[in-house]
Image: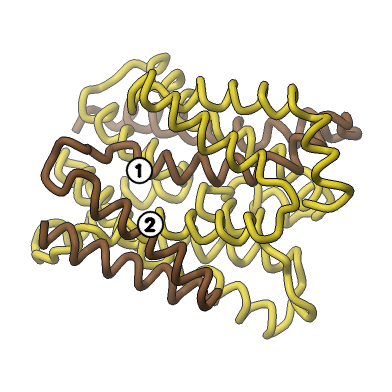
Chain colours: A brown, B yellow
Amino acid sequence: MIDTGHSLLLIGAMALCTMFLRFLPFMMFSKGTPKVILYLGDVLPNAIIAMLVVYCLRNMDLMAAGHGVPEIASVLMVVVIHKWRHNMILSILTGTVIYMILIRAM
Amino acid sequence: MNKTTLKYSFMRSLPVMAGYIVLGIGFGVLLADKGYSFWWAVLMSTVVLAGTLQYVGVELLATGASLISTILMSLMINARHLFYGISMLKKYGKMGWKRFYAIFALTDETYSLVCTDDVPDGVDREWYYFLLSMMNHSYWIIGSFIGAFIGNTFEFNSAGVDFSMTALFVVMLVEQWEKSRTHIPALLGGGITLICLIVFGADYFLIPSMLIIAAALLLLKPAITKAEGVDEA
């Protein structure tokens, strides 16, 4: 480990930068929000959740063992089970178990 | 706050629990491996509370990175949080004192839950946001503690548990898809990110994706607003 002072400095920087990004929109628009930002606020969740799904799969390697089958099959499974039962815990649990089995089997 | 709110918050936090504890353990093990005692892992998970950045942070600490490169790295990795704030302006904006903590603790996973929710009757919305954030935060801290404290002493083959976070986002995507009148934003978000991933590679695609998504949503505003009617939050 590097010295305590520098460690604290770097952790402090990570914390403050993250807080800055999380608080910035609220600080910028504390006195009324422009219509265009409200519009973005309404449509961003759909776009960002889709972005996060891709983000989670970013390290999927189609050339490596498995060729992305565990990821793709498990994601599809989650979609199907969720469409069927609409039970968040069930969908996530089943998908994760299937994924864990597939990465060991392939 | 009432019991219904507490119970609802806990139920909603359950899918995050396993993922955060396992990912937290992974982080704690890595940091302890670099010679940091468990207090450091707990400290980082308490004040930073950002998974990817903390994993990268282990390397920054281990190599004694400069302050400026740490700042740049933090801003780059977490830039997506700007979008979380923008989409929570309405819900978190008027929350009183509870908003300071809720905004501080707005991780990817908590965001995916709160931006999708139709909070049922009898649940106090503000306390729900607050409690859910706190529960998720504590899972992350507990995981980091376990990882750093117990470390590699017990072999537990947990490979793949982190898929529960991917599954959480997929579930939220399905729920939003069913509730939305227009799928243009979801298709843009997924499509643009995928193209950027292919073009820029896994290390650099996130910021170009965000910029292009924002630009595309603004350009297509007339079409999206029309398809959407007045609904959608």
Q: Looking at the image, which residue is at 53% across and 48% down?
A: B107
Q: Looking at the image, which residue is at 32% across and 60% down?
A: A74
Q: Which mark is residue A75?
A: 2
Q: Position of residue A33 (x, y in %)?
A: 87, 33
| Label 2 secondary element | helix
Q: Position of residue A2 (x, y in %)?
A: 22, 28
Q: Nearer the viewer, mark 1 or mark 2?
A: 2
Vertical arrangement, residue B100 with respect to residue B81, above or below: below
Circle 1 residue: A57
Q: Is residue A19 visible?
A: no
Vertical arrangement, residue B185 with respect to residue B102, above or below: above
Q: Amino acid at mark 2?
A: Val
Alpha carbon separation for disc pair 1 and 2: 10 Å
Q: Looking at the image, which residue is at 42% across and 64% down?
A: A78
Q: Which mark is residue B26?
A: none
Q: Amino acid at mark 1?
A: Leu
Vertical arrangement, residue B54 with respect to residue B216, above or below: below
Q: Is residue B217 left or right of residue A80?
A: right
